[in-house]
Each structure stands twice: as structure tokens, then as C-alpha cells.
Amino acid sequence: MLKRISILCGVLLLALSYSFTDHHEERVDFSRAERRMLHIPTAGLFDGADHFTVTPADLKRDGWCFPVVDGVVFTPEFRHEPVGWYIMSAEERHEVRAAMEGVVRLVRKTDLGKTVVILHPNGLETVYAHHAKTLVRSGDYVAAGQPVAQADADHGAVYTYFTMMVNGVQLSPSTFAEADGRLKPDWLRFSLDGEGYVHATLHRPGTISERAPRFEWMKAQELVDLDRPLTAMERQHVGVATPGLFENTSAVTVDLSRVGTWSYPLPGAKVISPYGGKRKNHTGTDLKTRPKDKIRAVFDGVVRFSGKYSAYGNMVVVRHANGLETCYSHNARNLVKVGDRVKAGDVIATVGRTGRATTEHCHFEVRVNGVPFNSNYLFDHARHALRSDKLTFKRKANGAISIQVD
């Protein structure tokens, strides 16, 4: 297997430019070259070290999954690329899914056909090509398993071409996984020499130290330490300050285009009472679908409060690394407990009318440092879509919070 990996040694990083027009407005600050070139070094990957390690745990952390449901890896007679996987499905124009969570770096036509490239927090990039239609745009954050394209037909077969890259160098998915998607147990260490060559070596688990890179577009939103133990006050009350959020600063910024994966709190819901309301004292947005419908966590986070809380009835509060807290109340039943780690989209409660409520609905609040603000800053509720603005929260001397939108 070491011999197979050695093909990476001595590979020059090529810059292949294309003259195709990109019709999408970018939402993440990739450079023009990053948005146009397939093989390009990954900015920040080797900052502070000349090597990094990728383990099966890193891939699992970012949600590793097979790119095509019920897909089969095959070797076509018309094979053009020897490194990646050709994945066929009996389903016409089948969907191609993101193998892991990440941010879409490139969406354009290349010599592989319509191509999508996703940059992942573990340092790798995945490449999906030969598509009839792409479903994402450059700058989109995608969850593992989220559809990113529809496969195209050629020579009587509907297939997608799937490969991986590290720092712009193509790498076979077989390095990490079996053809059925099962991860191999080996660790790979990637190193960069003084001349810009990438070298890869295979190691048994635990034989080398690992460093999992977290790029700046991920670090920028990790404003709160979710591993810090919760105090009794945090566990028992809703409106409490977030420790460390405004430490040594009076303003914090949350870039909604860089928060990672997200979910609308109640898919399919309509707003029955907006923030403010008729009396101007409604601190949340009331969302309605049907009784006992599934309420979902908006972002990854840790459950800070779960229980009955005054007129809110059954309530769940989730603290997120980006500094925000989301609150879900009037629940028929809370499905999580204090201290639970949740992912965006996880079901955390069911719709009810506990507390002071006249109909079954979810009272949804967003708070920063314990202070509620209008969830319209986060969501376009009509489209159930997360906004892409930068929100700067400024703490005043009296504890109030002002919001600036950029």
C-alpha cells in the first residue's frame, strides 16, 4: 500500500485555469484563483507546520458517507481518469452527495465536465464531476450527505466521477476507504518539502502524532468553549451571560456565511406571530406546523437548559460555538438533556402548547449573552433560509446589545 501512496511523491502542484463564466455571487472569501482552478494549494493548510495527519476519526467527525446512495464503483472502458472512482447507479440522473461537511470552493465546468470541489475541515478536498446539473454554488456550506449535483449519462451509463485532493494533488478515495465506502483503519501523514512537493506516508493507528487542521473560515466562528462545564446558574436559567464571549472586547462578529451546517428550526412552518408582536414585547418568533412535529437544532452546540421555564413551558436552550444561543419552547416534550452535544438538524423536541400558549407551536428565540434579538437577523423565514450577513454585536455599559449588519 505504501507503494501505491508513493505516487504522490514528487507530484508538482499544477494550476489549471479555465475561461468559463461563473454566474454565482460568492459568499465566502475565496480568491479568484481558488474559485477558478481545480488543482491549487489549500491556503493555510501547512501554516505553522510542514505536515498534518488525517485519520479515520477525522473523516467520521466530518460525517463521512458514500457519495451515491446504492452506488457501485465500476471501471468503464472509456475511463479517462485513473485515480478516482467511477460510481454508477441504476437511478436515472441520481443525486450526488457531499462525502463530508465542508465549504464549496469551486463550481464550474472543467475537463472533467461540470465539477464541484468541497474543502473540508480535516484538510482534504473532495471532487465530484461529470454532472448534468450542479445544486450548490461556491461559498455554500454543505452537510455530509447533502445533494450537490445530479449525475450525467455517457456511453449508456449514468455515473459520477469522485476523487480527492490534498493541497491540489489528486488522491484516490481508495487510500481512505473500500469501494463500498467503509473506512480503512490507517492514518496518512502529508508533508510539504521546501520545494513545494507533497509527500504522503501510511502509518498504523497511534504510531504518529496527529494534527487536525481547522482552517480560518472555521476558527473565526469558534467564539465559545463548548467543552467548559456548565454552572448551576447556566443549567437553571434562560437569560444568563455567556462566559468569555465579551472577554476583553465590547463587540463580537458572527459571519452567517461561515457558521458551518445549519437547519431551520421547524421545517415547513409558517410564522404566526413575529418578533415584537402587537404589544412590542414578544421576544421570539412563533412558528407553526402541526402538533408533535419535530423541532430541530439550528446549529451544532451543547444543550444548556432543558426543562420547564415559567410561561415558556417546556423549553430547550442550545449554546453554539459562534456565540449565539437558540431557544425552543412550548414543547410537548423535550428530547435532550442538559450537557448533550447536538448537531444542526438533530431533533431536540416536539411541538406542543405547554406554558402560556393558545395553540400548538414553537416559540423560537435567538439570544446573545442572554439578550434576545430578532431572529429575522438570522433567517429569511419566508424562504426558511439562513441569511449570509455579518452580524456585529456590541455590548453597552448597561448590558444591552446593539446589532450592526454588514
Image: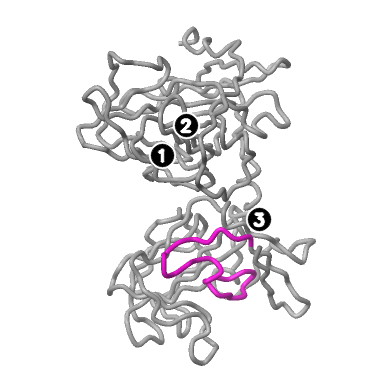
Q: Secondary structure at mark 3?
A: loop
State the residue in front, 138 or 285: 138
Does the rendering let one see residue 315? yes
Q: Which mark is residue 207?
A: none
Specify the amino acid type for callout 2: Thr
Tell me where residue 209 appears, x and y as whole percent: 62, 26
Quadrant into which the C terminus falls: bottom right
Specify the amino acid type for callout 1: Ala
Q: Which mark is residue 98?
A: 1
Precedes in sequence: disc 3 or disc 1: 1
User: How far apart are labels 3 and 1 at the CA level?
Assistant: 27 Å
Location of residue 315 (image quadrant):
bottom left
Q: List the residue tagged with mark 2.
A: 126
Q: Which residues are magenta?
A: 366-390
Q: Secondary structure at mark 2?
A: strand
Callout 2 crowding tier (Cα within 10 Å): few <14, some 14–19, many ≥20: many
Q: Give the number of the mark in front: 3 or 1.
A: 1
Callout 1 crowding tier (Cα within 10 Å): few <14, some 14–19, many ≥20: many
Q: Give the number of the mark in front: 2 or 3.
A: 2
Q: List the residue tagged with mark 3.
A: 223
Task: Indicate whether residue 193 is drawn in magenta.
Answer: no
Residue at point 33%, 37% (across, down): 132
State the residue in front, 244 or 111: 111
Tell me where residue 134 appears, x and y as whole percent: 39, 41
User: How far apart are labels 2 and 3 at the CA level?
Assistant: 28 Å
Location of residue 98 (image quadrant):
top left
Query: Is 47 placed above or below 296 here?
Result: above
Specify the amino acid type for callout 3: Leu
Tell me where residue 268 appears, x and y as whole percent: 33, 66
Residue at point 68%, 18% (across, down): 196
